Amino acid sequence: MKCALVTGGSRGIGSAICQKLAQDGGYHILINYQSNKEAAEKTLEQVVANGSTGEIIQFNVADFDEVSSQLTKWQDANPEAIVEVIVNNAGVTKDGLFMWMTPKDWNDVINTSLNGFFNVTNFFMQKMLRNKYGRIVNMVSLSGVKGTAGQTNYSAAKGAVVAATKALAQEVAKRNITVNAVAPGFIRTDMTSGLDEKELIKMVPANRFGEAEEVADLVGFLVSRKSSYITGEIININGGIYS
């Protein structure tokens, strides 16, 4: 059984990615969620409706012990399963000006995006190397590429994942494992629903927010065999914002 794991797969871009990978076929989809079981189950329904198989798996990506124990439990129950695709999508924002930022708001964001990338990817890395095949896609952000005022924590976390993507890609390329990052700009999801769309559109040459499905299409390409000579890349999907 060949599997694709999507962290934070219950809603928004994560859910769209799960559905896209199900459409493309060939993978049993592991939908990770932390707290919203109902949304994860809805995504699973869509995955099945799109002709694939899947299951939901609960853990907080920021907690190394929890990630390790849940994934070990899953692996023990599915000894034949091979995770070929990892999409590190889980992330949180705790926006605010740096001068008023609390250590908790800093640490929560860093732990989820940066340590989450480590905790999940590190668990599977040796297995992927032995298997001599893998596709890792890290969801970063416009904030991690150009920096965004009011998001110093998020920009720091995503910027670190950008650098990690480039370094890890060089370590594992010989084993037919690619590591790329996708940097969305303004995408219409729950996470951006509080933003002033009319005002922000002025920054976007394409004159609109993107859709989660458009990001999912790009991820679908990067996890396919068609992208085997692309690695260490940070691909912007932002409607033309210069970053």
Image: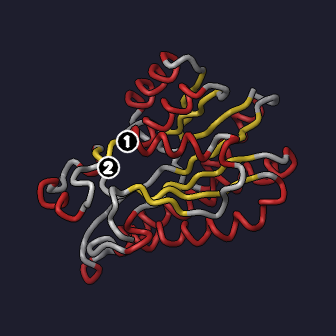
Which structural element holds mark 2? strand
Q: Residues within 10 Å of mark 1 (few under 14, many from 20)?
A: many
Quadrant of the snapshot with the C terminus = bottom left
Residue positioned 63% across, 43% down in the render: 223
Q: Work out whether residue 112 can be spotted.
A: no
Above or below residue 125? Residue 232 is below
Residue positioned 30% across, 44% down in the render: 189
Q: Position of residue 98 (x, y in %)?
A: 29, 80
Dot 2 corresponds to which residue?
Answer: 187
Dot 1 corresponds to which residue?
Answer: 212
Labels 2 and 1 touching (C-beta < 8 A): yes
Residue positioned 49% across, 54% down in the render: 139
Q: Amino acid at mark 1?
A: Ala
What's the distance in space between the residues labelled 2 and 1, CA to CA? 6 Å
In terms of depth relative to the viewer, which is nearer, 239 or 139?
239
Residue 182 is left or right of residue 230, and the answer is left
Residue positioned 12% across, 60% down in the render: 199
Residue 135 is left or right of residue 100, and the answer is right
Q: Which circle's residue, 2 or 1, is located before the other in the chain?
A: 2
Quadrant of the snapshot with the N terminus = top right
